[in-house]
Amino acid sequence: MFWDFLSLTPESIHQVTILFSDRGTPATFRHMNGYSSHTYKWYNAKGEYFWVQYHFKTDQGVKNLTREESKRLCGEDPDHATRDLHQAIEKGDYPSWTLEMQILTPEQAEDFRWDIFDITKVWPHSEVPPIKIGKLVLNRNPVNYFAEVEQAAFSPGNLVPGIAISPDKMLQARVFSYHDTHIHRLGPNYHLIPVNAPKNASENSYQRDGFMRVDANGEGGPNYWPNSFGGPGPDPKAGEPPFDLSGKAGRHAFTHPNDDFVQAGNLYRKVMTETDKEHLIGNIVGHLGNAQKRIQLRQTAVFFKADPDYGRRVAKGLGLNVKEVERLAVMSREERATATS
């Protein structure tokens, strides 16, 4: 089912290529980059706003595992990455990441080649050069792992004034679903657990009651707004500036003229070494080889559309007819789905 879904959503090809390359198995937490993937909005007191993406680049250097190494570690030491991070911090070798931002004005975004709200696309650095703005440093280990790690509840809906979400439909869904998950996992007052509570601001809301509420619970104040008893109210100055929307609301097919294959093809052709390509093909063949032949054909045609060499090598690794793969590659996704159903 994994490959059935991916083969029917060819826009996933760039991320699939990254996942099945050695980049998909970082050696440790210290030796991997972190990305927002989603686009966010930054705004200021002047009412100006910008579209941004976050890049946390490891200062330790990127290190990855081959599938043979990762398979061995899964059996011998499945907690190796957690232990590595703990030991590095314990001895004072604090891991750090440089935060780089990609920033687009609304005008730049309007004419940008790629849909900036499509999580399957990246903003090429040659077109939007990253700007270094600071560092993230991990300088202490948890005192109690359960309290500070197991109970941690991260959500893209937890934002401060100056940062807002974008129309990215997957980000919009996560804003709701992460909160719901935390309520289910940790309870309705998970935001009051010390690791999740704000450090430099008091809670000013009408969130009341629920199990595990052990503070003053708003005392005798009102739990509704507006009220005339001095309860907290919205701060208009914290609101994000509006942005223009047009068109008719409804369920529409995705129509942005993105090329779903060029970024994956460029990654394969221009970035990967021959060793990288060999590992990529081997990882894919080892995994895709468990799928039904019709799904193998459909997915291999997607690889072919990204780069003919990419597709041919996967086809040969799977023992598929290369001519048949080439024939499927020139079809539309709908035709390809029908031909391999």
Image (tube, rainbow, N blue to C red):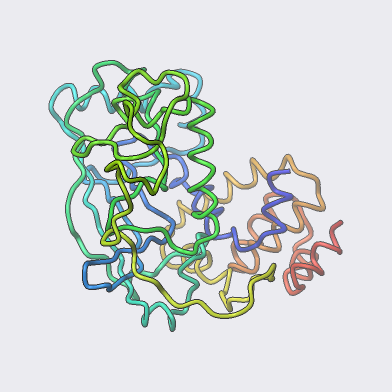
- The picture places residue 194, in percent across and down from the top left corner, at 29, 25
- Count of marks, rendered view: 0
Q: Is residue 95 above or below residue 227?
A: above
Q: Is residue 44 above or below residue 105?
A: above
In the depicted view, which residue is nearer to us: 89 or 27? 89
**From the image, which quarter does the C terminus lie in?**
bottom right
Q: Residue at 30%, 69% (x, y): give it.
A: 103
- The picture places residue 24, in percent across and down from the top left corner, at 47, 44
Q: Quadrant of residue 93?
A: top left
From the viewer's perspective, tell me whether residue 5 is left or right of residue 238.
right
Q: Residue at 18%, 48% (x, y): give it.
A: 135
From the viewer's perspective, tell me whether residue 244 is left or right of residue 298.
left
From the viewer's perspective, tell me whether residue 149 is left or right of residue 132.
right
From the viewer's perspective, tell me whether residue 258 is left or right of residue 78.
right
In the depicted view, which residue is nearer to us: 211 or 231? 231
- The picture places residue 335, in percent across and down from the top left corner, at 82, 69
**From the image, which quarter does the N terminus lie in?**
top right
Q: Is residue 15 above or below residue 205?
A: below
- The picture places residue 247, in percent across and down from the top left corner, at 60, 80
Q: Residue at 24%, 53% (x, y): give it.
A: 99
Q: Residue furthest left?
A: 92
In the depicted view, which residue is nearer to us: 237 or 179? 237
Q: Quadrant of residue 60?
A: top left
In the depicted view, which residue is nearer to us: 251 or 339? 251
